[in-house]
Image (spheres, rainbow, N blue to C red):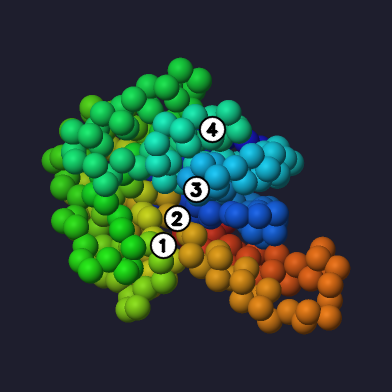
Amino acid sequence: MLVNLKEILAPAEKEGYAVPAFNVYNLETLMGVAEAAEETKAPVIIQTYSRLFKEGSGYYLAPSVLAAAQKASVPVCFHLDHGASELETTRALRYGCTGIMIDASALDYDGNVALTRRVAGICGHVGIPVEGELGHVGTVNDASMEEFTDAGQAKDFVAETGVCALAVLVGTAHGRYKKPPRLDIGRISQIKEAVKIPLVLHGGSGIPDDQIKAAIGAGICKINFGTDVCYSFLDAVFASSRDLYAVDLFMKNAVKSVKAFALEKIRLLGAGGKA
């Protein structure tokens, strides 16, 4: 069943688990995630990265995500991940997303507030909740990490923008870590106490299990997985024999690999059986 971002996060916030948010790029990654959610009776967020909406492939992928969500017996939110501008967020609304992330975190604070508030207002006209980001979550290749999100500033940001969920910088980065990150669990607790809305952890791929659980206990309600979805798909593709040229048969192992990864994270986040 297709639900919006606020609807899927509210039970997680109340019951103390996190909803896994998986980035999908094609039919096979979508199938793996959808099958895992059904098998575990878990709510799931199926995300599409901003670039796909900008470059056009999201136009073809979105109908498949919506079909999977509508067929599912579990709650599914179709979410735009890291919307870069009003172009991507507007297209995401047109293509049926039920959650929108606007990522203006690379701007200064006032610019971030202004763009996030504008997008939240537009999305609010059609009842679609918005996720914002305060504290720029960069990549593992960055020379250094910016200052972690400040709890007081986060409180002001939420009040000024009207977002329903907030992505925060507390020690993670996008990509495959060269060494395990160390999350600031105390900072997560402080931000959660200040903002009173669900918090989002980006860069979930490769975070040690104990830190994932501690972060959920401190207030994280949504955790994003993108890099390891790609690796789970690609590892299976590269291991498959090229003698099998029927693409639907060739891709079966890739679907199974993505599903296995999704099953692992659903259980780790405590989302299994929550549908």
Marks 1,2: beta carbons within 8 A: yes
Choose the circle earlier in sequence order: 1 or 2.
1
Residue 108: x and y in percent read 19, 41
Label 1 to label 3, Cα distance in Å? 19 Å
Q: Which residue is mark 3?
A: 51
Choose the circle earlier in sequence order: 4 or 1.
4
Q: Which residue is mark 4?
A: 91
Q: Which residue is mark 2?
A: 224
Q: Residue at x 70, y 54 (%)?
A: 27
Label 2 to label 4, Cα distance in Å? 21 Å
Marks 3,2: beta carbons within 8 A: no
Name the element at disc 4. Answer: helix
Name the element at disc 3. Answer: helix
Circle 3 Cα neighbour tier, 10 Å, few/some/many (<14 / 14–19 / ≥20) = some
Q: Which residue is mark 1?
A: 204
Q: Amino acid at mark 2?
A: Asn
Circle 2 Cα neighbour tier, 10 Å, few/some/many (<14 / 14–19 / ≥20) = many
Residue 198: x and y in percent read 35, 42
Q: Amino acid at mark 1?
A: Gly
Q: In screen coordinates, is 168 left or right of 30?
A: left
